[in-house]
Amino acid sequence: MKAVHFGAGNIGRGFVGLLLHEGGYELVFSDVAGALVDAINATGSYTVHEAGPGGVDRVVTGYRAVNSAEDPDAVAEEVATADVVTCAVGPTVLRFIAPAIVAGLARRSPDLPPLKVMACENAIGATDQLRAEIEKLDPAAAGRAVYANTAVDRIVPAQPAGAGVDVTVEPYYEWAIESGPFEDDLPSVPGAHFVEDLGPYIERKLFTVNTGHAATAYFGAQAGIERISDALADPSIAARVSAALEETGAVLEAVHGLDPEELAAYRAKILDRFRNPELVDTVQRVGRQPLRKLSRHERFIGPASQAAERGLSTSALVAAIAATTAFDDPADEQSVELQRRLGADDPVALTADVTGLEPGHPLFSAVHAVFAARQRELRAL
């Protein structure tokens, strides 16, 4: 069996690639970073270090890497004979990997079973998005694959200097995968659970793990705190993050009928993971790309809009949105762009453009007030 994984970064090696290796797949990484590809190919194994209670070291072998920028033909050849294709590249990059998958599907022997495609991204319907990009390029080739959405969860912080291709991660992980597209031929992914309806799993993860992680980062940045674990050690920040997650929990209960006691236990588990002192993670890393995190179906506007539509509380989520607008990191392109636009654009138009909310939406006025307040603050500086 062979799996091709697009994105040989820390998540690709420390989470997806690790589980594919443990599932018995020959592993091929595809990446555009030449130095990373060379470093992977220069090693015969790498170690995934689990930092925290119960953590162990796991060794990955039986892999190679291909430079998709320099040798797209080689990537296509690997895809053509693969059993599984996965990716962890970021939702905005899916359209750039679609041509390589299409090229591989076009070469695929009709005697082979359909290629199993799974996008492992922090986004709702990421595999659907990837499939749409593939179908735009070649509908016939697209039909030679089956596509399953997934929900993935593992904290992989910035890596210590000198780690090479080894990766440090938290011990906890979750990988939920739609079972329907595969029928009776499920991919071999140890520890994954296959579910008929992925929607509740995706939104539970996105609106708890990602909402809580980002809120911790933005509140922590406001307080001048560097590490995520230190931010949650601040009682005020912990209370504000918990309040935001209680609001997302109310949405999950209302929309998906999830059990409130199970949701409370899930929230507590998530916050304990963020407090892991052995996992050195920074508010700058978690808070990067604030424009994406403020978009319509992401971790703040997504649950807050659903809450507002149902008459549920949104004040804690709006407070997290306010902290997001204050995130000012000169090293992050989206942070720089957001601060520039806050200083120059009309607040009504800016609110609508960034969040995707229409002015008549019940959440719009509260978010507009947040944007306008940040504009006044910047102009007073």
Image (cartoon, rainbow, N blue to C red):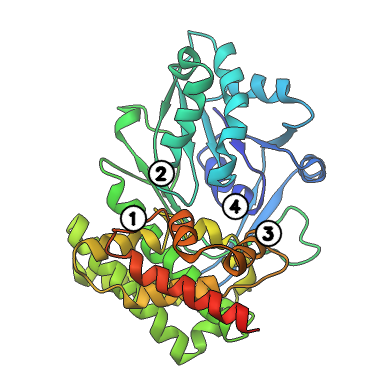
**What amino acid is at disc 4?**
Ile
Q: Which mark is residue 11?
A: 4
Q: Circle 2: is it few (<14), some (14-19), or many (20+) Cα within 10 Å?
A: many
Q: Position of residue 70 (x, y in %)?
A: 79, 29
Q: Position of residue 329 (x, y in %)?
A: 67, 70
Q: Which mark is residue 296?
A: none
Q: Which mark is residue 150?
A: 2
Q: Is residue 349 above or below residue 262?
A: above
- Which callout, 2 or 1, points at the residue further toward the start of the chain? 2
Gap between marks 2 and 3, in whole Å? Answer: 28 Å
Q: Position of residue 124 (x, y in %)?
A: 40, 47
Q: Is residue 269 left or right of residue 354?
A: left
Which residue is painted at 53% across and 71% down in the image? Answer: 325
- Which callout, 1 or 4, points at the residue further toward the start of the chain? 4
Look at discs 1 and 4 and give the one toward the viewer. Answer: 1
Which residue is painted at 29% across and 74% down in the image? Answer: 246
Residue 276 is at least partly visible in this image: no
- Which callout, 3 or 4, points at the residue further toward the start of the chain? 4
- Which callout, 1 or 3, points at the residue further toward the start of the chain? 1
Gap between marks 2 and 1, in whole Å? Answer: 11 Å
Depth check, front residue: 128 or 153: 128
- Hey, which residue is sitting farthest front in the picture? 346
Q: Is residue 182 above or below residue 231?
A: above
Give the residue pinned by disc 1: 203
- Hey, which residue is sitting farthest bottom in the picture? 235
Q: Is residue 21 above or below residue 168?
A: above
Residue 320 is at least partly visible in this image: yes
Q: Is there a contact, CB below 8 Å, between mark 2 and mark 1?
A: no
Report how many numbered discs are placed on residues in the image. Answer: 4
Q: Is residue 41 left or right of residue 310?
A: right
Give the residue pinned by disc 3: 333
Which residue is painted at 56% across and 13% down in the image? Answer: 106
